[in-house]
Image (tube, coloured by chain):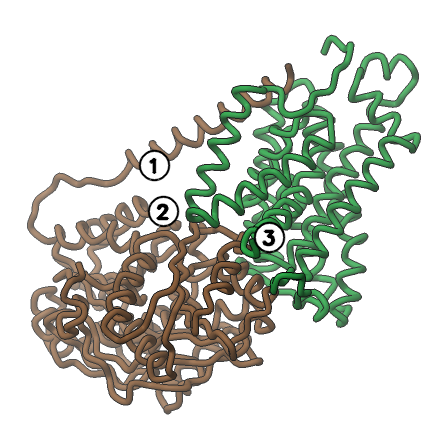
Chain colours: A brown, B green
Amino acid sequence: MSLLWGRRILAGAMTLVAAAAMTACGSKTSDEGGTAGVTADVSGDTVKVGLLNSLSGTMAISEVTVRDSIMLAVEEINAAGGVLGKKIQPVGEDGASDWPTFAEKAEKLLSEDRVAAVFGCWTSASRKAVKPVFEKNKALLFYPVQYEGLEQSPYIFYTGATTNQQIVPGLDYLKAQGTKSIYLVGSDYVFPRTANKIIKAYAAANGMTVVGEDYAPLGSTEFGTIVNKVKSSGANAVFNTLNGDSNVAFFKEYKSAGLTAAAMPVVSVSIAEEEVKSIGTQYLEGQLTAWNYYQTTPGAANSKFVAAYKAKYGADKPTSDPMEAAYVSVYLWKAMVEKAGSFDVEKVRGASDGITFDAPEGLVTVDGKTQHIAKTARIGKIGADGLITEVWNSGKPVAPDPYLKTYPWASGLS
Amino acid sequence: MTVLFGQLCTGISIGAVLLLIALGLALTFGQMNVINMAHGEFIMAGAYTTYVLQQSITGAGLSLLVALPVAFVVAGTMGVLLEILLIRRLYARPLDTLLVTWGVSLMLQQLARDIFGSPNVQTRAPDLLTGNVAVPGGLTVANNRLFILALALAAVVALTLALRLTPLGRRIRAVVQNRDLAAVSGIPTARVDRATFFLGSGLAGLAGVALTLLGPIGPTMGTNLIIDAFLVVVVGGIGQLKGSVIVAFALGILQATGEYLTTLSVAKVIVFVAIVAFLQWRPQGLFTLRTRSLA
């Protein structure tokens, strides 16, 4: 009897949770106001910019490091005299790992704070949620994370890698290593599914076989069967697009099953220095990653960035690709504004093409047409010290191609 | 055939994990009928205990062995504190217990975040447990899975013996079967409740130590496990350990088979549909305790 009572209570609790979720959706801002863009308020001797990252919730782990990097760039720029003689005044908002909240906060930053540009977002879901807000208000978002491509909003600058700057070079590297068969493992959402579509098209055109493809729900931590399947497939390599906690369970299982980086390397696209720390080098040593930046990337610009970051946030804090892309995005915006001689969004967009910056990852160039940036692709190997060392790079910056138009094998996609 | 055997092994090892996380709950929810939403955080406490011990004990194997009893006591003590401070006052109000323990669960998660930081922490597994052993048919079984299976079975045996043979076990069974009669017979039911809660929460701590070998160690690890643990106990039936044992392995094998034939997401759906169908047929769970109690 009391069992049934207990179950009824559980059901009641679930209904409560569902109701709360619906309220959250209902509160999504849909400002019916004018379609004309809001104008940034630059009348004083400061210029406001918005910082929109999750400081709470599941994504906080990653997004806090991005916020820290943006703040570092803002402080450096202010110390050097600001932008067009105005000091940058950052206005921070917490997206709370909740996509409607991102849209709401973006609207607030644009219409109440009247910021000149917004830096932030991490997941594709949050970017898709704020995209209409920026397009309606004709305002700028700088998005610092590698993503699945196939997007080109006139009001977003994408400073992370698109697929042809990360996934395609990763495949090129595997092909050069003589890889004939690959197994695809990913989390079950838009990025891994899109990435794997591209990988399958690439494989078909390049004489590789995709011997298996498996998806785990986000947050899933039981990989016994998937690793069993990977092991019995006899693939040469694994392409891993898992995200978050799943990576920890996957690599622990991978090692337990007796699979090694030497016999069957795993190429990951979501594991940077910060994630290596939380998974454990015991499980990751020798595995491969595809990014555009590592803490170990050589060059004076990176030494300066790493030293400044560690001085501000602690010597044990690693720097990673999304952090670097976020840091760079502030400098790129500054360069665009200065070239345009104005904070006006349309003028800034018009001035963007060809802007270059000597970034920690190497020279980057803004492509005004796609509003992505040309960047060097780098394949790295995870070392016993938890840092990632480059084993291959594309030699020169790869021009962004979010729709993969220049790749004949990709013609059937999207 | 080899694939079949491999999947059977995977199913059993999934079952062992389910059993280990559900065993403590089989006591606190199954025997005492307390819906403790903070049970997952006791698992988390066990995992973090392993992490803390490894800061001072460098040998990975030794620290794991030390962590087992220490985590049992740490999580058990947290359970007793929760029982004394909150649950004891709410025995007649199950809905309030659910909300209160849910709140406690959120507070413990934030506490872990404040102490250890939001990112996951890592522990080193002893080399002995990162390898695998070959079994006939060209297959391998991971050592850490064997360790968890052994630990789960040892916990079940120890718990069964304790409930059958020790004076405390007899009192626990007496209170479960008929609280009022036990009370008038002179059994201090409040103290028995506290002891039961200590055991149940302690077992969660034990599960936490074992899980450091398999998955992430972070503030939210408990919430990911709590649903599975409740499923096992509800389907297994209240007041009986053997129900939880059978259901844990059955769900493990069903999950592994479903996952092999379809995908992980579909396998989860299959498991849930099977559970719903089963509970339609037997709402009281696999086994029920027959008592003459009116409660």
At label 2, counting other C-alpha atoms closer than 10 Å, the crowd grade (few under 14, some 14-19, many 20 or more) is: some
Q: Give the amino acid at mark 1.
A: Ala
Q: Which residue is mark 3?
A: B5
Q: Nearer the viewer, mark 1 or mark 3?
A: 3
* x 73%, y 40%: residue: B201
Q: Quadrant of residue A176?
A: bottom left
What crowding class fits label 1: few (fewer than 14 Cα within 10 Å), some (14-19), or many (20 or more)? some
2 or 3: mark nearer the eye: 3
Q: Secondary structure at mark 3?
A: helix
Give SS at disc 2. Answer: loop
Q: Position of residue A65 (x, y in %)?
A: 43, 66
Compare marks 1 and 2 and give the one earlier in the sequence. Answer: 1
Residue A242 position within the rendered picture, expressed as x and y whole percent measured from the top left:
42, 60
* Residue A393 location, quadrant: bottom left
Residue B186's place in the image compared with A171, above or below, is above
Whether residue A89 is visible to the viewer of this picture, yes or no, is no
Other residues around mark 3 within 10 Å, as few (<14) / some (14–19) / many (≥20): some
Residue drawn 34% across and 66% down? A210
Q: Which residue is mark 1?
A: A24
- Which mark, residue A83? none
Respond whether the residues carrying marks 2 and 3 are from the same subunit: no
Q: Chain of mark 3?
A: B
Check disc 2 and report the residue beneath it.
A98
Which residue is rendered at x = 54% and y = 72% of the image? A284
Q: Are marks 1 and 2 in contact (CB under 8 Å)?
A: yes
Percent across and percent down for residue B221 are 57, 50
The one of A110 and B199 positioned closer to us in this rendering: B199
